[in-house]
Image (cartoon, rainbow, N blue to C red):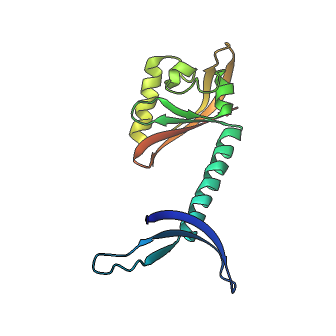
């Protein structure tokens, strides 16, 4: 006596059609003018959408693994504010911060530029040209060590958000 919608099933169809992901919908169709109870079933082939979702999930896992295991530091900044919105493990090690401690910080706060004004000038240049490169940028980590890095940043849209990707290589 109740209708249902969105019941997912996987089914192996014969004759070489193969496995299909189906979404079932159903319910009674009786009305006052047609009191005999009948059942109507609907089938939506969800196979392509399910495959696309699975491919997207695999791509996200592959991207995240590539991002986290890179042997270069990678920072993703909000291109308007300059705040770090993502960073990989190598970058955290390079500046001596723990996982998640980079988030919300400015580049000068993590040792990338000597002072606030130098940081602001570099960031304005990045915003203006959408690309900057520094070949021998000294980085002081939180433990007091100094490392020379190559710093390359470019700006692009990520969905509807403008971000700057910074690749930092220990040279």
Q: Reply above or below: 94 against 28.
A: above
Q: Reply above or below: 134 against 97.
A: below
Relative horizontal placement of residue 129, taking residue 14 as reference (left or right): left
Q: Residue at x 64, y 18 (%)?
A: 141
Task: In the displayed orientation, state which residue is furthest to the top.
Answer: 144
Relative horizontal placement of residue 59, taking residue 6 as reference (left or right): right
On the image, the x and y values in percent for residue 165 come to 53, 40
Q: Residue at x 68, y 44 (%)?
A: 65
Front in this rendered view, residue 34 or 125: 34
Q: Name which quarter of the figure residue 66 lies in.
A: top right
On the image, the x and y values in percent for residue 96 come to 66, 20
Front in this rendered view, residue 88 or 155: 88
Q: Reply above or below: 48 against 171.
A: below
On the image, the x and y values in percent for residue 156 come to 46, 46
Q: Residue at x 62, y 22 (%)?
A: 139
Q: Quadrant of the N terminus?
A: bottom left
Q: Residue at x 61, y 60 (%)?
A: 55
Relative horizontal placement of residue 135, taking residue 124 as reference (left or right): right
Task: In the displayed orientation, state which residue is furthest to the left.
Answer: 33
Q: Name which quarter of the figure residue 71 lies in.
A: top right
């Amino acid at each position: 006596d109740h209708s249902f919608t969105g019941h997912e099933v996987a089914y192996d169809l014969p004759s070489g059609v193969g496995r299909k992901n189906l979404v079932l919908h159903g319910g009674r169709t009786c009305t006052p003018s047609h009191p005999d109870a009948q059942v109507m079933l609907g089938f939506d082939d969800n196979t392509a959408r399910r495959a696309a979702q699975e491919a997207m999930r695999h791509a996200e896992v592959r991207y995240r693994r590539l991002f986290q295991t890179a042997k270069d530091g990678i920072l993703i900044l909000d291109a308007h504010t300059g705040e770090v919105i993502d960073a990989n493990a190598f970058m955290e090690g390079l500046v001596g911060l723990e996982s998640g401690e980079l988030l919300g910080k400015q580049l000068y706060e993590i040792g990338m530029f000597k002072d606030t004004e130098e940081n602001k000038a570099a960031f304005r240049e990045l915003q203006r040209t959408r690309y900057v490169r520094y070949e021998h940028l000294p980085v002081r980590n939180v433990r007091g060590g100094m490392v020379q890095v190559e710093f390359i940043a470019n700006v692009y849209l990520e969905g509807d958000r403008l971000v700057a990707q910074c690749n930092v290589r220990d040279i």
